Amino acid sequence: MSLVSRLAFLPAALAAGALLPALAQDGGAPGAFSWRADLTLARAEAAQSGKPLLAVFR
Amino acid sequence: MVRPPAEFVEAAKDYVCVRVLDMAGVDLGVFRFDYDLTFAALLMNGDGTIYRQYGGRDGGPAEARLSIASLVRAMKETLADHEEYGKSPRPPKPAPVRAIEQIPAMARQIKAGKAPKCFHCHMVNESERRTAQDAKRWSRDSIWLWPDPARVGLALDPADQTLVKEIAARSPAAAAGLRAGDRLARVGGRRVRTIADVQWVLEETPFAGGTLPLAWERGGEAKEGKVALRPGWRVGSPLDLSWRASMWGLSPKPGFGGPRLSPEDVAKAGLPAGAFAFRVQYIVDWGDEAHTGRNAAKAGIKKGDLVLSAAAKADFESELHFQAWFRLTQQAGKTCEIEVLRGGKREKIRLPVVE
């Protein structure tokens, strides 16, 4: 990939800089949002609820 | 404390969200992704069907392809895939769980009482490589994991990941008829919505090459073409490999390394602005690779040396780039000339290359 391409991507890279810390925490008021920690249970919950699963690996 | 942004929290209401920090017990047959990544997301059905991959990187900044906006976009778009799938589910056939603890090289390590405290994602690739090497069936071809779309000449917009940003001249993607501004729809017959989706299809495409059908939109018009991949198409550059944790296990190794000099330190050292240099901070004196450090020390490498070039090559983009370059280009039994700056004087050190 050329240097020109890398420079073109730079703004996106800067904008993305907060993604990892932003997703590192549970957020907002208690109960507003929290990550499940057990993959097996989360998978079963997704299957039962009919919702898709978002599995983040860090 | 940094909170997840509101747009992510809103999109997350339609999902069951799980965050995995340890690969212990994770079924590798179900949760397939690029294990070298420090961040990867799977958007999937609870039955084990993966709709989307999200994440990925190249030799550039680690988060260049990651943003809340692109993740939320993928989450919203995937809801349509989920609904469509629900009309005729095709769950994967049940298979025995295969976790990192069952990979033979890791199983032996655990049995020897050397289990890691936490199983990091990248350990999957390392354990697979060690297993293949032990069984004498490892090939260098296998290091080119999850090929970047650049391998076929395709650069996608990190913020709008199906939008074609650039097509390399005379590349397979150019020959297929793709142009900048096109919107990629399908690769290898699979719907793609992210850069990592494209990598997923490429990961399943053999080293020997072949033909990949593509479908895209241009100005509302549907287009189709084929990407022809020649044998060895997955082989990238040392820079492509440089960010991968699995790079560290490859040989030969220089046996030393350290941080790249800051622009201020480059100026202090009297080097031209923008010059590459790294300070030797460590010479390997631990584990199975201690002999590589002893070899470097015997050749004359010292802590504090500023490494300027290797085999007359000075255009490294990072110290990791140097490490990957050494592993991919140097041959055991030969020598590599390392130019260092020591006490303000340039010196050339002939480093024997050892396995």
Image (spheres, coloured by chain):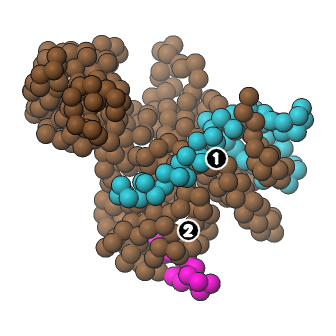
> Please, is residue B284 above or below residue A46 in the view?
above
In the rendered image of this protein, does residue B182 appear above or below residue A39? below
Q: Main secondary structure of the magenta part?
A: strand
Placement of the N terminus of chain B among the 4 image quadrants: top right
The subunit carrying tag 2 is: B
Three-letter amino acid code of the residue under disc 2 = Leu
Q: The numbered mark 1 sits on a residue in which chain?
A: B
Indicate the amino acid at tag 1.
Ala
Instruction: Please name the residue that numbered disc 1 is placed on.
Output: B41
Relative image position of residue B74 (x, y in whole percent): 68, 58
Q: Is residue B211 magenta?
A: yes
Does B108 sit left or right of A30 as displayed?
A: left
Q: Tell me where residue B185 appears, x and y as whole percent.
A: 59, 72
State the image quarter where residue B174 is shown. bottom left
Q: Is B294 left, or right, of A9 in this rendering?
A: left
Residue B303, quarter of picture: top left
Residue drawn at 80 percent across, 35 percent down:
A27
B247, B194: nearer the viewer: B194
Q: In which quadrant of the rendered image does the C terminus of chain B lie?
A: top left
Which element carries disc 2, helix, strand or loop? Answer: strand
Residue B163's tag is 2
Marks 1, 2: nearer the viewer: 2
Q: Nearer the viewer, residue B256 or B210?
A: B256
